[in-house]
Image (cartoon, rainbow, N blue to C red):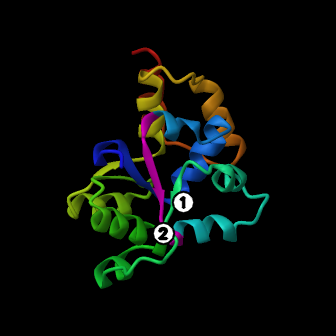
Amino acid sequence: MPEASRSVVVNTTPLITLSVATGSLDVLRVLYDRVIIPHEVMREIQAGGQDAPGTGDVLSSDWMETLRHPQSVALFLRNTLDIGEAAVIQAAMQLQIPRVCIDEKLGRRVARLNGLTVTGSIGVLAKAKRAGFALDVEQTMNRLRAHGIWLGRDVEQFLRDTDSQ
């Protein structure tokens, strides 16, 4: 089994965003030995339908590990977050995976409060770029915008700054 530090539990939004941004999910494959998708996240992806952005990439990526059964989510998580974020945090804690990939602000905060290391879509893209993954930052941002995904100016600048490092 790969070491936990090269593992990540991923939420719905980052899967969609990374697929749209790069045209695949290979960026996750480059950075992590083990990419885990909770059952609840897979259900959210499938609920979007076959033609939804990212769905095809998630369903065809047989190298990612999809948990087959729903998480027994702690009441606090269930009452605070949507089911995908709650399941990501719960799965990470149960599997002793220290890193989660969540984009939503509240989910990120709750993950940190539970002792997890948090990254998000843009953090993954920046890390991949620094690791040598071929990524045209302007083209990536254009793809995101074309799919209705808008980044804040500070986030865009962070990604651009990665381009010059």
The amino acid sitting under disc 1 is Thr
Determine the residue positioned at 63% across, 35% down. 22
* Mark 1: few/some/many CA within 10 Å (<14, 14-19, 20+): many
Which residue of the protein is positioned furthest toward the front in this rendering? 1
Viewed as shown, does residue 122 lie left or right of 147? left
Say left or right for 85 vs 21: left
Q: Nearer the viewer, residue 87 or 35?
A: 35
Rendered image quadrant of residue 32: top left
Q: Are marks 2 and 1 in contact (CB under 8 Å)?
A: yes
Nearer-the-camera pick, 72 or 104: 72
Point out the stretch of residues depicted in magenta: 31-40
Q: Please tell me which of labels 2 and 1 falls first in the chain.
A: 1
Mark 2 — residue? 84
What residue is drawn where x is 33% and y is 76%? Answer: 77
Image position, residue 126 (x, y; %): 44, 31
Measured in 3D between alpha carbons, the distance from the residue under mark 2 to the one under mark 1, in whole angstroms, is: 7 Å
Q: Residue at x 63, y 64 (%)?
A: 45
Say few, some or many: other residues with alpha carbon within 10 Å of mark 2 (under 14 / 14 to 19 / 20 or more): many
Image side of residue 87 versus residue 116, left or right: right
Look at the image and tell me in which quarter the C terminus lies: top left
**Residue lying at 34% horizontally and 70% vertically, measured from the top left:** 90
Q: Is residue 144 above or below residue 159?
A: below
Q: Is residue 37 above or below residue 77?
A: above
Most extreme residue toward the right, as rendered? 51
Q: Which mark is residue 12?
A: 1
User: In what element is the residue under mark 2?
Assistant: helix
Q: Amino acid at mark 2?
A: Gly
Q: Which mark is residue 80?
A: none
